[in-house]
Amino acid sequence: MDIEGALADVDEADLRAETIAFLQNFMAPAFGALPKREIELGVFDLLRNLGILQTEATIYSLMTDLKVTRTKASQLIFDLEIRRHGSDRARLDDLVKQALIETKFAKDGDYFVMEIENPLTIAHMRQRIREVGHFSDTSFNSSLVRAPLSAVTDLMLSIIPDDQHQAIKAALVDAGAPDNSVKAVVKGALKTLGSKVIGEAADQVAEGIVNRSADFLGPLVNAGIEQIRDRWSALYPADDAEN
């Protein structure tokens, strides 16, 4: 980790402000009174604020830069993030939305397997899944969330405002999805996405379909109605849309 090189690019006023804030925190209530864990978190926060460590750095890069275990790197992120966003449910929901859009998906039968590194995002997603009456599994790998298709469907609908559900359903139906209840239409769309884009049939994807789930999930979770009509229509054969 090139600390000297990174600091050379930091604005002097920002460096002064961050150093003052760190030292004031370290001296409260008295020099040496902070527990070792609090000092570590303070230094970690300082490194991120100064750009020496990237805010969105992967756990692996933190392991190599800080020379710590995966468990410690993950815990540092979780402890800092929970203090900043732990009481902000809207912010946590936004993290889940972004994870759903950006994560690498794999489909395992009627289960979706999502790779998510941020431990706070994983914890909130699992809580959200519990709240809608389902379960998720991270026993195989703490960065992988495995959940039934119904759970992913209910999770998405729970973080999308209710007043947008009907518009999303209508856009998917216009794109070629079979008409049904909101949940059935969204669940069917995710199943189609899983089989044609991120599932076993990915090698048979029709020409012109971008093989990235984010191109489809982004408009869905953000209720981009016109984008849903435009992009999701590529997943449905023309004869299906006519039936």
Image (cartoon, rainbow, N blue to C red):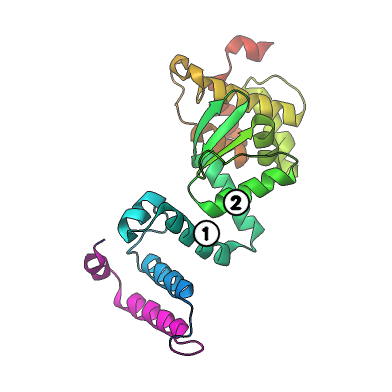
Lateral position of residue 143 relative to residue 90, left or right? left
- Residue for badge 2: 123
Density class for disc 1 (Cα within 10 Å; few <14, some 14-19, many ≥20) is some
Q: Residue furthest right?
A: 181
Q: Is residue 141 above or below residue 34?
A: above
In the rendered image, the quadrant that contains the C terminus is top right
Main secondary structure type of the part rendered in magenta: helix
Query: Does 71 appear above or below 172?
Result: below
Helix or strand or loop: what does disc 1 sit on? helix
Query: What whole-number distance in Å separates the C-alpha atoms at marks 2 and 1?
Result: 9 Å
Mark closer to the chain start, 2 or 1: 1
Q: Which residues are magenta?
A: 2-31
Residue 159 showing in the rendered view: no
Residue 160 in the figure: left or right of residue 74: right
**Residue pictured at 46% horizontal, 22% vertical:** 209
Tell me if label 2 and label 1 are in contact, CB under 8 Å.
yes
Please name the residue shown 58% across and 47% down the image.
96
- Residue type (three-letter) at the residue carrying disc 1: Phe
Would residue 101 be visible to someone looking at this image? yes
Q: Position of residue 208 (x, y in %)?
A: 44, 20
Q: Is residue 201 left or right of residue 241?
A: left
Vertical arrangement, residue 29 with respect to residue 39, above or below: below
Residue that carries the numbered disc 1 in the rendered image: 78
Q: Position of residue 78 (x, y in %)?
A: 52, 59
Query: Where the N terminus falls, by quadrant?
Result: bottom left
How many marks the image carries: the answer is 2
Q: Position of residue 206 (x, y in %)?
A: 47, 15
